[in-house]
Image (cartoon, rainbow, N blue to C red):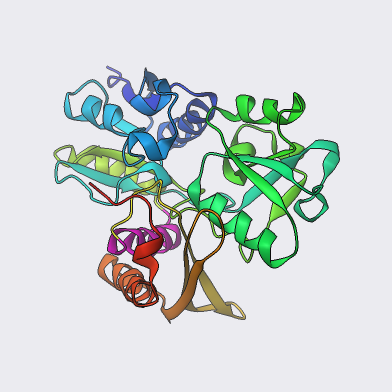
Amino acid sequence: MNPKALRLGTRRSKLAMTQSEQVAKAVRQVTGRAVELVEITTYGDTSREQLAQIGGTGVFVTALRDALLGGEVDFAVHSLKDLPTTQPDELVLAAIPQREDPRDVLIARDGLTFAELPDGARVGTGSPRRMAQLNAYARNHGLRIETVPIRGNIDTRIGFVHSGELDAVVLAAAGLNRVGRIDEVTDFLSVDVILPAPGQGALAVECTAANADLAAALAELDDPHTRAAVTAERSLLAALEAGCSAPVGALADLLADGQVVKEMRLRGVVGATDGSTLVQLSTTGPVPHTHDQAEALGHELAAEMLAKGAAGLMGERAL
């Protein structure tokens, strides 16, 4: 007799469905079981308010987690950057697959790059983190832009450019890659210009801690380097006591000497959304081999950033 199909909980957006189907395909391969997608509407999908107004932290996640705990689904797929930094005891992050491109990108009218935008260009983003860094970069390079808060899915955001309402929008490269629209990008923004959100480009596969057999099977999809990097980034976010809509960017990457990975570098930034002030620092340590070592790197950098005044630049504190 064939085992019952596994139920994968996912948000209803095209991007969420696409990345969930990619995970479902991998789970079918490692378990030999059928996987069916169960669409779940989250508060973040139905609210039209800006994320900072509705709390940011967990608005895309809570309904999926409730479905897991209620037995409606067997596992769920999240964009890792949407996850609150505190992990419930009843749930386990069974897998963090290999990360996609973590960079932010620009989609602008007439194929323009960021440096080519006209004076006073209107640039749309729903992220205070992006606003802070875009405005700071513009200030430092003699550009004058207006950052405009927007919400909506990929189609909606790119539509603001096509309609002429905005000159450009900033999106995550990973999402555009996953839905096959990366060719619409007019400029890939270096992480030296904009640090991504902690965990950006990574997915989280979550199930109940009680379902140890499923957790072990899902763990086949885990990428240890990605897990170490995002653990350090999320540890920084947690130590700053900032929610996922606060203007915090972070990126951990592995530094290699030839073919040998020697160290992990963690970079972090907190900024005022008008770009007037940025606290941007980095630290380097041995490649973490445990969760605690990765967390320690994040805590270390957060302490340095707080000492430089980062707390005063965060508009949203975790509840």
Task: Please state which of residues 290 and 300 is positioned toward the viewer in this rendering.
Answer: 300
Q: Residue at position x 45%, y 31% from top?
A: 20
Residue 274: x %, y % from top left: 55, 55
Q: Residue at position x 39%, y 26% from top?
A: 10
Q: Which residues are magenta?
A: 223-240
Residue 111: x %, y % from top left: 84, 41
* Left or right relative to 197: residue 289: left
Task: Please state which of residues 19 and 235 is positioned toward the viewer in this rendering.
Answer: 235
Is any atom of residue 289 visible in this view?
Answer: no
Task: Please state which of residues 190 and 28 is positioned toward the viewer in this rendering.
Answer: 190
Residue 142: x %, y % from top left: 75, 63
* Left or right relative to 141: residue 250: left
Q: Which quadrant of the structure image shows residue 255? A: bottom right
Q: Is residue 284 magenta?
A: no
Is 65 drawn above or below residue 125 in the view shown?
A: above
Is 117 drawn above or below residue 151 in the view shown?
A: below
Task: Please state which of residues 124 and 275 is positioned toward the viewer in this rendering.
Answer: 275
Is any atom of residue 248 visible in this view?
Answer: yes
Residue 28: x %, y % from top left: 42, 31
Give the tally of numbered discs.
Answer: 0
Q: Residue at position x 35%, y 73% from top?
A: 297
Q: Residue at position x 18%, y 44% from top?
A: 88
Q: Is residue 231 magenta?
A: yes
- Locate the N terminus and report the quarter of the image it occupies: top left
Q: Which quadrant of the structure image shows residue 148? A: top right
* Left or right relative to 263: residue 72: left
Q: Main secondary structure of the magenta part?
A: helix
